Image: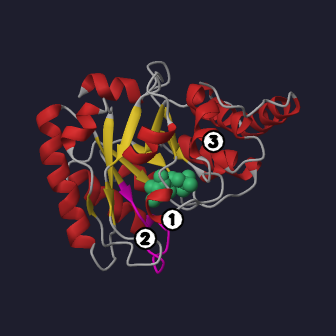
Amino acid sequence: MKNRLARIFNQKSGKTVMLAVDHGYFQGPTTGLKKPRETIMPLLPHSDCLFVTRGILRNCVSPATSTPIFLRVSGGPSVLGELSNEDITTSMKEALRLNAVGVGTSIFVGEKNEDRTISNLGRLVNEAEEYGMPVLAITAVGKEMARDARYLGLACRIAAEMGAHIVKTYYCAEDFDKVVEGCPVPIVIAGGKKISERDALQMAFNAISKGAAGVDMGRNIFQSENSVAMIQAVRAVVHDNYGVDEAFELFNKLKEKKVVDSVVE
Ligand code: 5RP
């Protein structure tokens, strides 16, 4: 368990930049991930780990990569159905076979199947503990839910109480520090819908300043006009204490050098 966690969190900064590319598990070929291999491979060297489903891992990621793999192991509904209707879809045996450093499942607090998804998390932790496998709980936010500290704090705490080793949630402008305080395990933030690069860097900066242990960011990296420059700017904020202006300047400099998003074998 400790060795796997040490491969997720950078030894110097104690933080992590996870690249989330699991969106297709309910959204299908979403913008930026229509050709997953082309999107993922140039970003891999800059990611502390890749959050991905086994299908995309098998088909679109070179097994020669040294970037740790964090597996999304839940699924079931599509974007057309009831999103909270999830079960565990990938076995622990498969996660071990794929040499994963962790497994992730969503909990839908306040949604139709909240009890089932929280039980899924509990059962996954039971099994994961047997093999020293860290579990990431993703606090999925339903369409009707306000992304405020009260709701996110509730969901994060429940995830930690169930035994999650890391919790992924959204950033909220007000009282995010209280969400972190109420959760005894590291919190990483999802980026959410694409916003401007500067705003996304500001969000990452705010989250880190208020106690987040990193990001598990997807769209604000892979939908960026220059995804390789963007992930490096996010890294500068998370690992190197860059301010927002400095990080945005870095993004622009890297972009101007026209970092080529070519496929790296
Ligand atoms: C989807 C997920 C994604 O991994 C998560 O939302 C992070 O991606 P983004 O930064 O695009 O929000 O768990 O359910």
| Residue at x 27% of width, y 75% of height | 113
- Residue 189 lies in the magenta stretch: no
**Magenta-colored span:** 138-149
Q: Is mark 1 within 8 Å of ligand 1?
A: yes
Q: Is mark 3 within 8 Å of ligand 1?
A: no
Residue toward you, 109 or 116:
116
**Residue carrying label 2:** 78
**Residue carrying label 1:** 27
Disc number for residue 39: 3
| Residue at x 66% of width, y 31% of height | 263
Residue 130 rendering spot, x and y as whole percentages: 11, 36
Q: First in sequence: mark 3 or mark 1?
A: 1
- The residues tagged by marks 3 and 2 sit, at their Cα atoms, a distance apart of 22 Å
- The residues tagged by marks 3 and 1 sit, at their Cα atoms, a distance apart of 16 Å
Q: Quadrant of the N terminus?
A: top left
Residue 94 rendering spot, x and y as whole percentages: 24, 40
